[in-house]
């Protein structure tokens, strides 16, 4: 079975597809799920556009982009906690901020030079989506595709 991934908690078959895929398929899956997460969470901004461009085309300063995304994730997480503090339940506004934070984190993981972080990008992107089934399908299709 190999190392347990957070993806196992979402879908055992998706985690299995991830384990069987090569790094190129994994990067493709991370991009596909990040695109779903960004679109479904409404995360916008020049730093998001730059990150997506880096994922699609490479080049650029990926470390600087990751730092920017890490800062954005931290800021959104703080905003989520402030909105949730003292609330009996998670409000729709707080949930949206949470999903945006997860989408930003997914992009940061996807930009990691360490392919071992790609499962984290996919996991965060799925959690960020309001339609997790769509995100799982996008990841699974990308992981199963043969791009060589």
Image (spheres, helix red, strand yellow):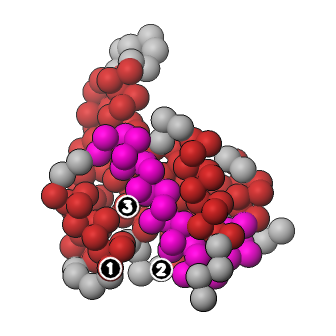
The residue segment tinted magenta is: 17-43
Q: Nearer the viewer's eye, disc 2 or disc 1? A: 1
Q: Identify the element where label 1 is drawn.
A: helix
Residue farthest left in this picture? 46
- Which residue is more in the foreground, 117 or 30? 30
Neighbourhood count class around disc 2 (C-alpha, 10 Å): few under 14, some 14–19, many 20 upward: few
Check disc 2 and report the residue beneath it. 114
Residue shown at 65%/80% (left/top)?
A: 146
- Marking on residue 70: none
Check disc 3 and report the residue beneath it. 107
Q: Earlier in the sequence, mark 3 or mark 1?
A: 1
Q: Identify the element where label 2 is drawn.
A: loop
Neighbourhood count class around disc 3 (C-alpha, 10 Å): few under 14, some 14–19, many 20 upward: many
Question: Which quadrant of the view contains residue 40?
Answer: top left
Neighbourhood count class around disc 1 (C-alpha, 10 Å): few under 14, some 14–19, many 20 upward: few
> From mark 2 to mark 3, how far is it between C-alphas?
13 Å
- Marking on residue 57: 1
Residue shown at 22%/82% (left/top)?
A: 60
Q: Earlier in the sequence, mark 2 or mark 1?
A: 1
User: Is residue 8 within the magenta segment?
Assistant: no
């Amino acid at each position: 079975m190999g190392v347990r991934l957070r993806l196992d908690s979402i879908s055992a078959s998706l985690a299995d597809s991830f384990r069987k895929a090569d790094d190129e398929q994994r990067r493709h899956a991370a991009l596909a799920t990040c695109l779903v997460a960004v679109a479904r969470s409404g995360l916008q901004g020049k730093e998001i556009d730059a990150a997506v461009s880096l994922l699609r085309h490479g080049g650029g300063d990926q470390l600087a982009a990751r730092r920017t995304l890490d800062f954005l994730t931290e800021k959104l997480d703080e905003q989520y906690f402030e909105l949730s503090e003292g609330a009996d339940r998670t409000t729709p506004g707080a949930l949206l901020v949470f999903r945006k934070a997860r989408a930003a984190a997914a992009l940061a993981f996807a930009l990691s030079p360490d392919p071992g972080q790609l499962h984290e990008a996919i996991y965060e992107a799925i959690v960020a989506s309001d339609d997790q089934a769509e995100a799982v399908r996008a990841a699974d299709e990308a992981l199963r595709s043969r791009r060589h």
